[in-house]
Amino acid sequence: MYTGFLYTYIQIFPKRRELFPIPDCTGKNMRAFVKTAPICYNSYMYTRGQNLRIAYILIVLSLASFAVTEVCKLKAAHQYAVLDAAFAQVYAGQKPLDAVSDGAAPYLFFDRELSESFTRIQKDASPAGLHDFQNSIHIHQRRISQGFDRLIFFSAVILAISVMLIIIRQGEEKAKLSRVQTANEEQKKFSRNLHDGVAQDLAAVRTYLQQNDIEKSGFYLNRAFEEVRYLIDSSRINLSEPLSRLIRDTAAAFESNYEIPVQVHIASSLIDRLKSTKELDVLYILQEALSNIARHAAATQISIKIIDVADDLIIRIHDNGKGFSQEQHAAQNSRQQGGTAAGHWGLVTMQERAQALGGTLEILHEGGTTIAIRLTHPVS
């Protein structure tokens, strides 16, 4: 029992662990996180293994204590009934007083006054003395039953605490796994943007330099520079902020790097109630759409509107650029699905993310291009 409460105390008051310092594994700083990643992982796995092992041991001990206590309580209740039946037979004159001596022996052994009282009753055999003796036995029985109940209660408490700690640990494990998956997704997105944007622009710079076309080389070099700056600014976004703030920050970073005005209108109560995983998907869709506009649309104005329609969340990203036809869209999908060429609009990726969110993504052509995302019951 003491071990269980001590373990719970350590879990509730983690600051008491100063004697066992481990590296900072929060990952607020990517460089520090990379340097300490092996130590953090080993420390985390060791601590997690020790904590879970103690929790499982406590579960086994509490279950064993509960079972043993319940069995002992049932056997004691049976002995109480047998002893009361013996007292009844003595009162009725069916058996001598010695008939209760065996059943009362455990109580007499630990209580000298009760033992002396029983000796006196054996000498004078008075009914009043026998009745008082039986009442004293009942008091001891109630105390023993209360002790059994306390043991059962504390066993249940330790069991509940251990199960709760295991559930908490499992939740932390899922959160860490989600963090790793998020980092992998971010790495893939960064690599894809480098390949589809910067790498192709640099390839165009090399081609036009070989042709001594300084004007086009400068154009693609500037565009590559803007793309790199946008990627750097996008990676600095603080994901602990509300999603509405992140969207405005993303739009501001895009406008600063590409010098394309972006108007953001948010009239939604659902946008800041999304789960963290859904927030990331929405943010990735927005970043992908803006990157595509910068690369292909030749737009001079962008607007982002986010509104609620009943229980649905609507996100509309509109630009006044040249857009593209449905035939181009279909051809792009076939190329990405067939694997014959890498896409440069990323529409399939955005559609997959929208579907993963339980929504739809549509491409509209009305004075430019509009990407309309509809998320059905996003907070349910």
Image: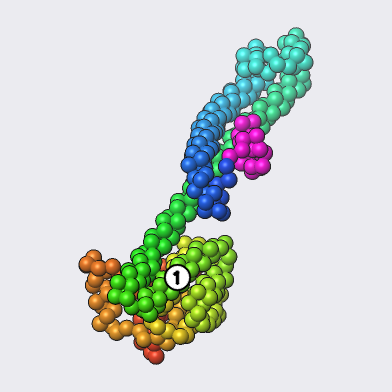
The residue most toward the top is: 123
In the rendered structure, which segment of residues is drawn in magenta? 2-22
User: What residue is shown at x 47% (from left), y 85% (from top)?
Assistant: 301
| Residue shown at the point (48%, 42%) measured from the top left | 38
Q: Secondary structure at mark 1?
A: helix
Of residues 160 and 139, the one drawn nearer to the viewer in this rendering: 160
Crowd tier of the residue under label 1, counting other residues whose Cα lies within 10 Å: few below 14, some 14–19, many 20 or above: some
Looking at the rendered image, the quarter that the N terminus falls into is: top right
The residue drawn where x is 62% and y is 17% is: 103
Question: x, y (%) of residue 195?
Answer: 35, 65
Residue 73 drawn above or below residue 126: below
Q: Position of residue 216 (x, y in %)?
A: 36, 78
| Residue 48 visible (yes or no) | no
Displayed quadrant of residue 203: bottom left
* Residue placed most toward the observer, 203 or 78: 203
Q: Main secondary structure of the magenta part?
A: helix
What percent of the width, then of the height, locates residue 78? 56, 26
Q: Which residue is mark 1?
A: 225
Q: Position of residue 238 (x, y in %)?
A: 56, 63
219 displayed left or right of 275: left
Image-based side of 269 in relation to 100, left or right:
left
Looking at the image, the residue that sits furthest to the bottom is 367
Q: Is residue 301 visible?
A: yes
The image shows a total of numbered marks equal to: 1
Looking at the picture, does residue 232 appear above or below residue 292?
Answer: above
Residue 347 falls in image quadrant: bottom left
Residue ID at (32%, 76%):
212
Image vertical order of residue 374 relative to residue 115, above or below: below
Is 112 a magenta residue? no
Query: Residue 69's image quarter?
Result: top right
The foreground one among 199 and 265 is 199
- Going by the numbered disc 1, the residue's amino acid type is Phe
